[in-house]
Amino acid sequence: MNETALLVNTALASGTTLALAALGLLINERAGVLNLGAEGMMLVAAVAGFAVALGTGSDLLAFGSAALAGAALACVFGVLVIWLNTNQYATGLAISLFGYGFSAFVGVGLVGKSLSERVPFQVPWLADLPFVGPALFRHHPMVYVSMLLAVALAWWLYRSRSGLLLRAVGENPEPAHALGYPVRWIRLAAVAFGGALCGLAGAYVSLVTAPLWVEGLTAGRGWIALALTVFATWRPMRALLGAYLFGGITVLQLNLQAQGVQIASHFLTMLPYLATIVVLALISRNAAFIRINMPASLGKPFHPGT
Amino acid sequence: MLKLEARAEPSRAMAWASPVIALALTALLAAALFAALGKDPLRGLEVFLVEPLNGRRALSEVLLKATPLILIALGLALCYRANVWNIGAEGQFLLGCVGGGAVALWLTQQGIVLPRLAGSTLVLVGGMLGGMLWAAVVALLRDRFNANEILVSLMLVYVAQQLVNWLVFGPWKDPQGFNMPQSRMFDASVLLPPLLERTRLHVGVLVALAAVVAMTLFMFRTYRGFALQVGGLAPMAARYAGFSARGAIWTGLLVSGAMAGLAGAMEVAGPVRQVTPYLSMGYGFTAIIVCFVGRLHPVGVVLAGILLSMLLIGGELAQSRLGLPSALSSVLQGLLLLVLLACDTLINYRIRRVSRQAPRSAA
């Protein structure tokens, strides 16, 4: 396989986790809810997906149960934040801490287990094309799912009535409530959707990227995905591109390590985190730009009047 | 049907009752969890709530682990009161280990033998500077670049861990350490003086208590402390009063960074005596829970610090006594925080029963 094609291939593959998580978080932030529990949901889903894949050998079931696990944890968050009006930062953090502990706890028996050998997926016919074949058409189906999802969500948010409603709820919930829309239920649905996508992202790590389970497997990808939503200024297609950019950085780091570059591997491992910080600082530098793009009621509780 | 009704004023009684209720509920959930795992629920609770307090040695271990938790949580309490969300105390703690470790290793390698008080003080200062440096990065990016402090401080935790790893695998590796990733042992002259014979307890616990007093005075008896809290509670009022929001960011982060760094330096100059990749048991994250359970109040933080320290030790005991994974401790920590946040709703709301039917007549 050609070197560049390989680079594109691996950047897409490793960016997919971030893409899935960022798309989910973006939707739930568009509804005005900030869920810092992304990392926790991904971890719980990663362990759930891995256990199911180990038991049944079915990727579909594994991804399905991971999405359910992520959504379930997200619903806990949602009920606390939306109905009990708890602080969104603190609650999300609690979900992350709980998710970390819980996944480590239930996953103890799965450490060191490996999944059965699976046939590498190829898009028929297209995969044999020179260059673009290996670069674009030899991925796990979830890679294409995430791409389609980004396109679909971009269309839905800006071109459909329900997408408009979601944005309205995130920008200014009072008028939506006054018009009789169930603001809280819409927010819960968005949070659950975010959790489900974080779940898919987590399972993608434990089933495709790794594929194994260790404590803290996702290594901060949930937090990077949260930063990505800011980087993407809450737009699906930009989130997808941002995810591939970060995927590329991760790959570059691994490639440099493999080529034995004279930099300690520890510094290369820092790269994705440092890149996140730099990108976040650059994009946030213009406060007015962020304020215009950010859903106006993000992080603010909504109490419907009685 | 039950309905939440806003209270006219937040309930002060509920603010302090809520952690107690949350603790009771978490204990119930834990008992259910033990039962589900096929263990005796009472025995399980005993491991977490009674055994850590059983005897002089056990008590000293509780205080030993409570010390970093209390120190870190004190700084975070100030931060959160100022509405500055530093959640990367874990990274600042690790940089405290690095800062303190750098001083201790330099003194050890140069063969400089200072009086113990001077040596250990230097190490602690090194740690505080390390923690402050890490927090200053967050403050700078927040202040100058408007970058979200939650994400930046958290990213820096991963960077800090890699930095520690690099040091102990590289420049700081003990030449006589059989290639193990750890630094050489510190000279005795830089270690914290022990407090109780035949225990690992050191004078750090006294420093933590002094910090509690200092933080109480700063929060409630100084102009600056007051200004910080106004900034957190009512940003507009703070602006109108001319209290600097930038000042709040810098003060909150530098103080909490220094406290976390201090805790880190105490860890290396106290029980560990060298730099290793496994310096923290997640103290920086557990301290966040300590902070909330302790109501962001210095005295509350002491009580909560002791409680969470028991939970950490209980996790180790659960592994050795009951054969349960030690991660059980983190499960219970997360659960405690979630339940607490739910209970905190009762500070601002009361539960009312309302009938489903609309009133028939106005009379």
Image (cartoon, rainbow, N blue to C red):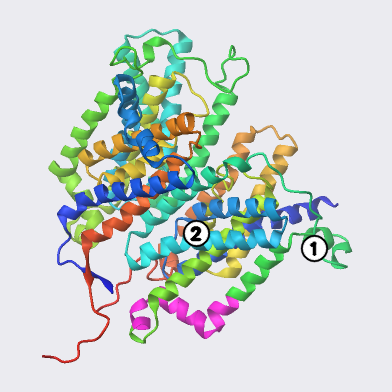
Could you say where residue B308 lies in the image, as x and y percent from the top left? 34, 38
Distance from disc 1 to disc 2, alpha carbons, whole Å, reads 32 Å
Could you say where residue B80 lies in the image, as x and y percent from the top left? 30, 49
Determine the residue positioned at 34% across, 24% down: B58
Q: Which residue is mark 1?
A: A137
- Mark 1, Cα crowd under 10 Å, few <14 / some 14-19 / many 20+, is many
Q: Report if residue A174 lies within the magenta region.
A: yes
Looking at the rendered structure, the number of numbered marks drawn on it comes to 2
Residue A164 is marked as none
Q: Which residue is mark 2?
A: A283
Foreground tag (1 vs 2): 1
Could you say where residue A288 lies in the image, as x and y percent from the top left? 41, 66
Q: Quadrant of residue B59?
A: top left
Tag 2's secondary structure? helix
Q: Nearer the viewer, residue B50 or A97?
A: B50
Could you say where residue A216 lies in the image, as x and y percent from the top left? 55, 44
Q: Nearer the viewer, residue A280 or A179?
A: A179
> Is residue A291 something that shows in the picture?
yes
Q: Quadrant of residue A17?
A: bottom right
Vertical placement of A189 versus B232: above or below?
below
> What residue span does the magenta drawing correspond to?
A154-177
Which quarter of the rendering shows the C terminus of chain A? bottom left
Horizontally, is B35 left or right of B163 in the view?
A: left
